């Protein structure tokens, strides 16, 4: 039974220290930023690495959670019938993160309790992924949810193993966040949790925009604004390409 479905900018340590010193004492004890606040997908896009760096006022553990825009996803069970694999029962999930990655200084299960991890959506098993309202209540959605996560891992859109947050001294930290070639466009949320004595003592969040650029952006925008016309143009181009190739082979 089967289920279907950049360059890192270096940040001087001195600047981080100055940021931490400049922060007022009443502010949250975390200063963070990204080396880039946008990922531009061009025709030769081969993935991107963004550096997240920060400073804490004291030695603490750090958890980083990155989520992409939420989208509906449908998982279909494939059943073998008379020697042929065919689509069977399906479940549609609402508001599924199109991208999910984590990083931490240590194993998150040793940092926070399961209840706290679930409240922050930290870890794939704690992600809130609910089935659509019209789903048959008799269906056990657990294997479908597991298949969804497996498929997202296979697409390199979910990272099974959290990246390592490196601590520099007692107050500075950094981690490289990887975005693959097939990363979905949209607004991403980067959330930072500071943990001390198995408690979240401070949180912060940043926005990261992923979008197409250059000719890729023009084609993407045209396809979404004028989908019917885009389909006609694509069909004409395909027919013309086929006719041209046929003419060349006839002459040869």
Image (cartoon, rainbow, N blue to C red):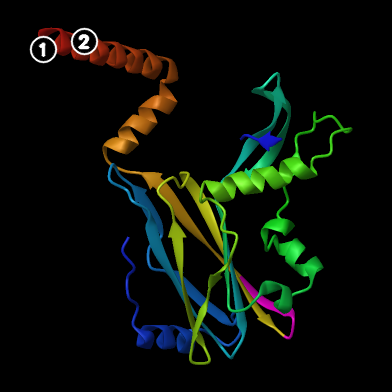
Note whether 3 is above or below 125 in the view shown. above
Q: Which residues are magenta?
A: 197-203
**Residue at left offset 74%, top offset 81%:** 198
Spot occupied by residue 114 in the image (x, y as percentages of width and height):
79, 68
The one of 246 and 103 positioned closer to us in this rendering: 246
Sort mark 1 into few (<14), some (14-19) or many (20+) by Cα contacts within 10 Å: few
Mark 1–mark 2 Cα distance, whole angstroms, equals 10 Å
The overriding secondary structure of the stretch rendered in magenta is: strand
Q: Given this view, does label 1 or label 2 mark the residue nearer the observer?
A: 1
Residue 228 lies in quadrant: top left
Residue furthest out toward the left: 251
Spot occupied by residue 156 in the image (x, y as percentages of width and height):
51, 51
Q: Is residue 30 left or right of residue 114?
A: left
Query: Which residue is the site of mark 2?
Result: 246
Query: Which residue is the site of mark 1?
Result: 252
Q: Secondary structure at mark 1?
A: loop
**Residue at left offset 41%, top offset 87%:** 18
Does the magenta run of residues contain 33? Answer: no
Q: Secondary structure at mark 2?
A: helix
**Residue at left offset 53%, top offset 92%:** 170
Q: Is residue 131 left or right of residue 167?
A: right
């Amino acid at each position: 039974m089967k289920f279907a479905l950049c360059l890192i900018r270096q940040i001087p340590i001195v600047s981080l220290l100055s940021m931490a010193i400049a922060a007022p004492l009443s502010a949250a004890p975390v200063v963070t930023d990204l080396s880039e606040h946008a990922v531009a997908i061009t025709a030769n896009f081969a993935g991107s690495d963004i550096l997240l760096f920060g400073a804490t006022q004291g030695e603490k553990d750090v958890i980083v959670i990155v989520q992409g825009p939420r989208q509906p996803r449908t998982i279909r069970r494939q059943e073998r019938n008379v020697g042929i694999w065919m689509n069977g029962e399906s479940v549609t999930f609402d508001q599924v993160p199109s991208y999910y990655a984590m990083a931490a200084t240590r194993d998150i299960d040793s940092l926070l309790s399961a209840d706290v991890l679930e409240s922050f959506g930290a870890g794939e098993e704690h992600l809130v992924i609910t089935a659509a309202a019209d789903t048959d209540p008799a269906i056990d959605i657990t294997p479908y949810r597991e298949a969804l996560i497996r498929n997202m891992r296979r697409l390199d859109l979910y990272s099974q193993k959290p990246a390592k947050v490196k601590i520099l001294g007692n107050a500075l930290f950094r981690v490289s966040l990887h975005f693959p070639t097939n990363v979905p466009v949209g607004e991403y949320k980067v959330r930072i949790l500071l943990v001390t004595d198995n408690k979240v003592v401070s949180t912060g969040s940043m926005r990261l925009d992923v979008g197409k650029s250059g000719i890729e952006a023009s084609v993407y925008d045209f396809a979404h604004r004028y989908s019917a016309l885009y389909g006609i143009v694509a069909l004409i181009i395909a027919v013309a390409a086929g006719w041209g190739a046929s003419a060349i082979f006839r002459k040869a």
